[in-house]
Structure formats: structure tokens, C-alpha cells
Image: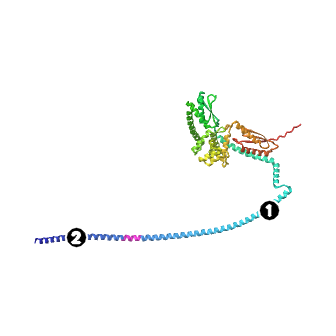
Amino acid sequence: MSFVFALVGLAIGAAGVYAFYHAQGSAHLKSIQQENEKEIAKLEKHRKEVEQKVLTAETALKEKMLDAKNKAFEIIEEAKKEEQERRKQIEKLEQRLITKEDQVDHKIAESEKVKEEFAKKIERLKAEEEKVEAMYLKQEEVLSKITNMSKDEARALLLENVERDYKGEIVKKYHMIESDVKEDANKKARDVITQAIQKLANEVTSESTQTLVNLSSDDIKGRVIGREGRNINAFEHLTGVDVIVDDTPGAIVISGFDLVRRYVAKRSLEKLIEDGRIHPARIESVVEETKNEISQMMTETGEKAVSEMGIVGLHPDLVKIIGRLKFRTSYGQNVLKHSMEVGYLAAAMAAEIGLNVQVAKAGGFLHDIGKAVDHEVEGSHALIGRDILKKYGVSKEIIHTMEAHHEDVPFNSAEAMLVQAADAISAARPGARRESMDTYIKRLQELEALVLSFPGVEKAYAIQAGREVRVMVRPNEIDDLAAIKLSHEIARRIEKELAYPGTIKVNVLRETRAIEVAR
């Protein structure tokens, strides 16, 4: 029975719980429905706003599309107008071209007519020329028959008669023209050269083949010679010079043609005497040390010379070669001093006559660069120098002035001629160069012998140290006109056959004496 009551109680409790939870679920469901209705109202409001925005956007878009269409129509209209204008311009140009073509065709037709007329005139002139030529030939034949002479014989006779009849006037006129030309040329040349030389005051340096080493005592001579001459033999072998130890008091003479060797020998001997230790091993050490010093000195000398000349951009090895010229002489004249002098003279003359000063200066300064190595390389110093300058990238203009200064190549610039003139001026100055007596006498004898080989020459005298030759001619064989020709022929032959420093003046003298005795 209690079990039944329990079941009934359980059923009542369960009904109560269900009723409770059903009431709560209904309330929650109602709450959810209210929230959903609020959300739906919001969404509806948002939908209406979106629809309004879309409507506004569609209206704006329609307005913009309408504006764009209007602008497009305007652009199309403008393009049509521009196209019409261009078409009109093209039509005008086409019309002008057609007109020009017509004019050109007309002119071509006219030129063809003119050409035909000229061709006809040329043919008529050729025909007339042939007629005239035939008339001349006929006249020549008639004249030849009358005179029994050919055309060449008649021309020669005419020239001979003209020369005979007007010889005096021809000679007089020639002398007048020659005198005027020479006077003007000499005056201008004197002015240019004088101004150039006035700007240059370079010393004249002459070197001999001997160098003197002063001694504090003659006792040192025995130490220099050494036992059985071993010291002096070793010294001569290492330096390549001759050492002369004689009775000259307080001096030893070093002899040799190579200035570098002589200088090395002099400095080495001075060091050995100062040091006091003179034996073969010490001699070898001192000579080697001195050679290194001389090599450095060459570089410094070259740099100093280039700096004094104001020439830039030369290769360091070329500058060292320039320094070697300090130890090179030509006819007793120091080649480095001579080169600097030629550079200054050429630059001064170039400045006076308006040429390239830098090319003239550099060409003059480097004109004898080949002499630094001409004892080591075969060929003339001008061509050796050309190869050296090409190797070190010197400009073609400067190379030409150098290689042409002895006319190994033809001149193609005025600067090259100036360098040759400056070289001659530097070499010809009194005291600049010296010659041995035998060479000097031989050159004068060759000059006189060459002049005496010309027909009609009676005597020849080389004077002014060989810078002038006076030629006495036989007046019955050489007349005034022939004397003028003879002077030119002698000068040209001297240039071709003789070697000489500077210039040689050829002075031809013709004298006619008429002697009668009054009794």
C-alpha cells in the first residue's frame, strides 16, 4: 500500500516539476520571440536604408553616365573638326607638291634644252678649234719652208735672241727682285731670331775627352797603381777608361770618350782616395756604388731639365733617358744643354710668328733624344729618337718635329722647320762647338775642292771658319746670268754632298778688267 502512495507522490512531484519547467520555457520562448521581432524590425529598417542608398547611387551614376556621354560627344566633335583641318592642310600640301613637281619638270625640260644648246656650241667650238689648229699647222709648214727651220729650232733661236737682246735687263730685274726679297726676308728673320736669342741666356758647355782628378799628395799615385799595377788594372777594367798616372804634379788624368764612364771613374777614384782603402775588392764595391748613384743622378737631372722646360706628361723612363744626355757631347757641346737651348729658341720663334709654342718647345727639347742611346742602337739618332718617343706615347706632332730636323723625313709642319732652324742656331753660335784640327781642315778642303770642280771657276776660298766660300770665276766664260745660276748650283751641291754645322754662304765674284796704256 505504501508502495502505491509512493508512486502517487512521485507522479504528483513529476507533474509539479513539469508544470514548473513548462512555465519557465514558455516565458523564455516569449522572450526570444520578442528579441527576434526587434531584430527583424532593425533588418527591415536597414533594408530600407540600403534601398534608399542604392536608389541614390543609381541616380548619381545615371547623371555621371549622361555627363560622360556628353563629354564623349564633345571630344568626338572636336576630333572631327581637327581631322577636317588636317585634311585641309594635307590637301594644301598635296597641291603645293603638285605645283612644285610641275615647276621642277619645267626646269628640267629647260635645263635639257640648255644642255643640248651647250653641246651644240661645244661641237661648233671644237670644229672652229680644229680649223684654227689646221691653220696654225699650215702656217708652221709655210714658215718652216720659208726659214728652213723646225718649230723647236725657231723657239730656241727666239729665246736665244731675247736672252741676248734683253740679258742686261733680265739680270738687272732679277737682282732687284732678289735684293728686295732677301732684304725683307732677312729683316724679318733677324727680328724673329734676335728676339728669340735675347730671351735666352744659356751657358755654353764644352766637354773634352779627359778629366782631371786632383791629389793632395803625389804619394797617392803609388797606392792607385798598386803592387804590379793590380789596382789600376782593376780600376780600368771596371770603369772602361784609361787612367794616366804621369809626372803631372798633384793630378791623375782619366781619359775616355764616354762621359758616363769618365764621371763614374772620377767619382770612384775620389771616394777611394778619400777612404784610403785601395784594393781590387774595394774598387769593385765603390765603382758599383757610384754607378747606382749616377743612375739616380740621371733621373734627377732629367726631371730637373723637364721641369725647367715646363714640359709635362712625359713617361718616367723617357725622363731618365733625357738625363743621360747630360753625359753626351756633340762636337764638344753638351747635348742636354744644347737640347734645352734648341727648345727655348724654337718656342721663342714660334711665339713670335704665331705657331704652336708647346709643340715647338717639346720638339726642340727632344730633337736629339736618340743620341742618348745611338751608341747602343743602330741607325741615325733622329730615327732612333722617333722610335723612343713612339714607345713612350709622345704626340705625333712632336715626333715629326724631332724626326725631320735633319730632313730624314720631309717637313709637313712649320714647327718642324723652326726646330731645324733652332738646332742650326744653337750649333753655329761662336764657342758652342769645337772640332778637331784634322776634321776642321778636311772639311774646308772638301768644300774648296767641290767648288773648284765646277767649270768656269778659277779660285775658291773657304773663309769665316768654313761658313762662307768665295768663288772667283773667269769672266770670259761666266757672264752675270751664269754667275747667278752657278751660285745656286754650288749651294745645292754643298747641301747634297757635304756635312757641315750651321749654314754656308756662297759668294760668286766676277770681275772684268779693261786695261790700256796711253803713250
Q: Which residues are magenta?
A: 51-60
Colouring convention used in this rendered image of the protein:
rainbow
Residue 131 - label: 1
Q: Is residue 445 visible?
A: yes
Q: Is residue 57 left or right of residue 273?
A: left
- Residue depicted at x 80% and y 47%: 169
Q: Would you say the magenta stretch is mainly helix, strand or loop?
A: helix
**Which SS class for mark 1?**
helix
Q: Which sits earlier in the primary sequence, circle 1 or circle 2? A: 2
Residue 337 x, y percent position in the rendering = 63, 39
Foreground: disc 1 or disc 2: 1
Amino acid under label 1? Lys
Q: Which quadrant of the figure contains the N terminus?
A: bottom left
- Residue depicted at x 74% and y 41%: 447
Q: Vertically, is 4 above or below 489?
A: below
The verdict on residue 476 being magenta is no
- Residue depicted at x 60% and y 33%: 233
Please name the residue that numbered disc 2 is placed on: 25
Q: Are marks 1 and 2 in contact (CB under 8 Å)?
A: no
Q: Is residue 61 left or right of residue 215?
A: left
Based on the displayed image, in which of its 4 quarters is residue 434 positioned? top right
- Residues packed near mark 1 inside 10 Å, few (<14), some (14 to 19) or many (20 plus): few
Q: Residue furthest right?
A: 519
Based on the displayed image, in which of its 4 quarters is residue 479 positioned? top right
Compare residues 384 and 170 and report the one nearer the observer: 384
Q: Is residue 306 visible?
A: no
Amino acid under label 2? Gly
